[in-house]
Amino acid sequence: MPLPTPIVKDPNFERKRMSVRNRILFFVVAWAIVLLPFLFWRSTWFGRPLTDRELDQYIHDQQKPRHMQHALVQLGERMAKRDSSAARWYPEVVRLASSSVEEIRNTDAWIMGQDNTRPEFHQALLPMLNDPAPTVRANAALSLVRFGDASGRPQLVQMLQPAKVTAPQAGRVTDLAKVGEAIRQNGTIAKIEANGNTVEVRSPIAGRVRAFSVERGAPVQAGSELATMDPAPEQVWEALRALYLVGEKEDLPAVVAYRKSLPNMPDRVREQAVQTEKAILDRERKR
């Protein structure tokens, strides 16, 4: 049996050590790989508490709408805790109700419901019921219920119903999401191509695709219906809770549709529908 060949060190071999410069560069790159995702997450996470100074800077930062949104979320948390320090920014909250950025108006409508003692919030919410964005209208209607105001009741009923998605321009449908697919608000549901340009069609609400009115490759006209979206469970649940307080007899068909078990709808939605129907009928009997 032959002996194994011994390992002999090559006398011409020189172990190359990493230079100090390269070692520093290596550690900098390694730290960047770990640190950059953290910094990105930290900058986009609205749950990070802001100091008063940061909040004041963020809420006035016209160049960065996400900063303004972050400030509003933090204000909403203070308001929910009945923190009196939030009141100093209330004039800004009212001003942002007319922001040109949909996400700002959406968040603003929600947080104004956190302090139902302020008449200026009540007045600022009423015009938001006519906002072009359905989620802004929905949050305004929900917040108004906290003021004991049922002005947004039609919008609350609308929150229980499928939303139509229409073509923003004429062209040819090149891509479609799947029926039953969960789509976030402003998520892409279809793509339309016209003159070499592709436009992404986005869902106005969070929910699931119920059905498409067109097929891939079909021509469409601007404003024509592309799809219907079933609302997400959270939206349905919030609307049912609000209608528990302000719903009327004519709202019952929209409410009772959720009494039965539905795909992708949790039991708490069905239970809330039962309670909301009962509350509406009880109010009707007492009249």
Image: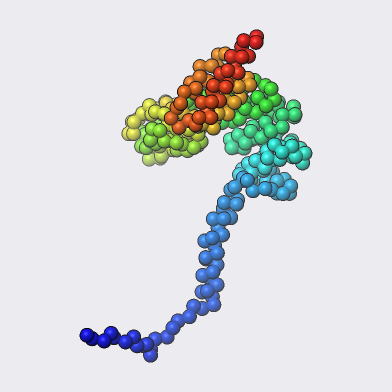
**Location of residue 284 by image quarter:** top right
Residue found at x 67% / y 21%: 149
Q: Position of residue 277 (x, y in %)?
A: 56, 18
In the figure, is residue 202 to the left or right of 10?
Answer: right
User: Can residue 258 be seen by looking at this rendering?
Assistant: yes
Q: Position of residue 104 (x, y in %)?
A: 62, 37
In the figure, is residue 157 to the left or right of 261?
Answer: right
Residue found at x 61% / y 14%: 282
Is 104 rendered above or below residue 255? below
Residue found at x 29% / y 86%: 5
Where, quadrant-wise, is the C terminus in this rendering? top right
Q: Position of residue 245 (x, y in %)?
A: 63, 21
Q: Nearer the viewer, residue 53 or 196?
A: 53
Residue found at x 34% / y 88%: 8
Q: Position of residue 199 (x, y in %)?
A: 43, 38
Q: Nearer the viewer, residue 278 or 130?
A: 278
Q: Nearer the viewer, residue 49 or 20?
A: 49
User: Can residue 68 be seen by looking at this rendering?
Assistant: no
